[in-house]
Image (cartoon, helix red, strand yellow):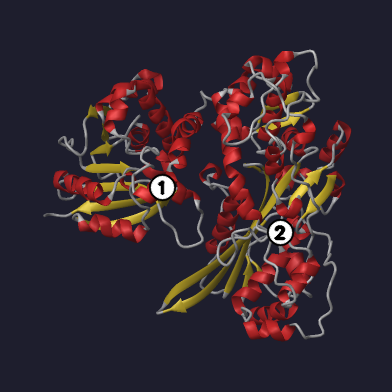
Amino acid sequence: MEAGTSKENERIADWIPEEHGENGRDSNTDPSSETDRCAPWSPGSEDLETALAPGPQPAPSSRRRLQDGDGASVGAGLRGWGGASFGAGKEELQHKRVVLASASPRRQEILSNAGLRFEVVPSRFKEKLHKASFATPYAYAVETAKQKALEKDLRAPDVVIGADTIVAVGAMILEKPVDKQDAYRMLSRLNGKEHSVFTGVAIVHCCSKDGRLDTEVSEFYEETTVKFSELSEELLWEYINSGEPMDKAGGYGIQALGGMLVEYVHGDFLNVVGFPLNHFCKELARLYYPPRPEDLRRVRHDSIPAVDTFENLSDSEAGGSDPGQSAKGGRGGEQADGDRSQAPRALDAALNGADSRPPFPTGLLELMDGFKASKVLFTACKLKLFDVLKDQGPLQAADVARKLSTCAGRTEQLLGVCAALGLLEKTRRGYGNTEVATLHLVSDGEHSLQGLAEYNDAHVWGVFTRLGLAMREGADQTRGILGAMEEERLSQNRELTLQFMRAKHSLSKLTAHHVATAFDLSRFASACDLGGCTGILARELAQEYPRLQVTVFDLPEVTELSGGFQRGGRQTERICFVPGDFFKDSLPEADLYVLSRILQDWPDDKLHKLLSRISSSCRPGGGLLVAEAVAEEEGASRSPRLRTLSAGQPRSPDEHRRLLQRHGFRDVRVARAGDLLCVVLGTRTAP
């Protein structure tokens, strides 16, 4: 892809007419059919749903395309990009006890060939992290790598290296197949399409301070794009029957027979094998010997020859519980455009000070295009596309258009973009839901996020269009992002209230179990969930603690509609709903008060008023449990900060601790709840 531009952006860009006034017919439509003519669409000009309705359609020649360029493959070569720096970094490791927390023979071979001395102590960490709690596949890979490295007995080693490689199609992570039929499903999903291989790497430095172990973790990830050829059923089954797919994530190994399935690789080949050696070497150089400006000027005159290619296609493990795509960087020291693999000559020139051109801003361009993908997702949800495909799929585009009463040409484009985004999969039989779509985008699914998508489309989308006004006037334009909506709006509009409740219900299902189990709450006999909405968290608390009585306290218009969200339409015996306003009305008595995603929706004056009321109502020995998106260190994921663009502000764990202490709570403890939330528990002391 051109300078690392994502495939989904290519598909979305293909949809945008160059000139809105030029009309024509889609090459896939019947010239005699007026109903298959579609209106031109561009972001911001009109709703995407409108474009799916009958109307004139732009000629294919008027569309812009992002060209699919060749990505550079930078293998294991150490010269040209700063081999001297790596040599020095490697020398540092020669005097340390280095442990590789991996049993992968291919990782061992890659590092051994690079001249690194290490011991192999396979990690016992069980890879059972909840994938849905991670915003991206690479975040899951990095966290797994870190847990593998930190699981080791860290008293003896100086350095522990952990790694985890995964295969991802869109947002879906492919595990090792459980049987041949599962392997066939995986390989069919990859057949003829691009997918990503991510490797997360964690380097843990250990030292002893004041008689206790201290660790410092450096982590990064590498991404490589792999494209499968169009493969026949016969070839797929021939490969499956060889037995090779059964111990490989994604069901293939690129360094062995699986190589015959691959049409091309964009990025680091060794990353697909199981370890991104090139990126690892650069990380060592950065950690141990960061370049000084005078060093870069001096290197320009050294006699290091330029290298056109660094290819080391040594036999290495691919796919396996280990596969990866173009370098996108990780936390710490990486640039916003992602660390895509550069052409070797350009990389050599940059490190020798001969090229001052800035890196291509891939990540920035993808960020600018991100709203298009969101709108496609929202439109598909609004049309109930995933419901139709769940009940009747796979279907051809024309059949989908008939069932949705939409334009055939535009519907096919919508389906194509959804497939590029990893929401649908396309086979010869037509389009069908991916596992992610079936799990989270079908309306009646247990873990459906349909309500959240519809609410974001109907309300939050407009809220963010007014963000500039909020910046200029200081007005709170972002209220209503799953939080403190104005009471009068809720009370006056039943449908708006239901949309808000569906959205919060969807989001709460992802985190309620994590919040309920973050601490042992068995010492409490009663709990009150303030702003508990549909009672999702209350049900989790009641399920985890059989003697706990739980009260959900929320606005009257919310509690009135809460019955429709209960399983079977009935509340459990140990859960009751009480209407009221936690700023005005007396709070129900309870041993434990709970605030989940509440504090960040309010400005400081309201926040302190609420905490003061809770503190006054809470008996000594009682508790306050707070769950909020947390403000992380610099360079962390942007997602929590986007979710907390509201009247309040995101806070760090220490800030939450001090906040509770200020209002009379002591023994304040902090825990993480998945990838989204920080949970804080404080105990009320005597006034």
Foreground of the two, 405 or 161: 405
Q: Which residue is mark 2?
A: 104
- Dot in front, 1 or 2: 1
Q: Position of residue 117 (x, y in %)?
A: 70, 75
Helix or strand or loop: what does disc 2 sit on? loop
Asked whether the viewer can see residue 483, the reply is yes
Q: Secondary structure at mark 1?
A: loop
Q: Residue furthest front?
A: 21
Q: Quadrant of the C terminus?
A: bottom left
Residue 323 appears in view:
no
Disc 2 crowd rating (10 Å Cα; few below 14, some 14-19, many 20+) is: some
Residue 89 image offset from top left, x and y in percent: 66, 79
Q: Nearer the viewer, residue 215 or 468?
A: 468
Q: Which residue is mark 1?
A: 645
Residue at position x 71%, y 62% in the image: 276
- The amino acid pointed to by label 1 is Leu
- Which of the marked residues, 1 or 2, is nearer the chain's N terminus? 2
Q: Is residue 52 above or below residue 369?
A: above
User: 66 or 111: which is nearer to us?
Assistant: 66
Task: Say if 159 sits above or below 47 in the image.
Answer: below
- Left or right, residue 91 beside residue 503: right
Give how far across and how far down residue 405 sits, in percent. 63, 15
> In this rendering, would 201 be left or right of 299?
left
Considering every residue shown, the one lying at the far left of the view is: 687
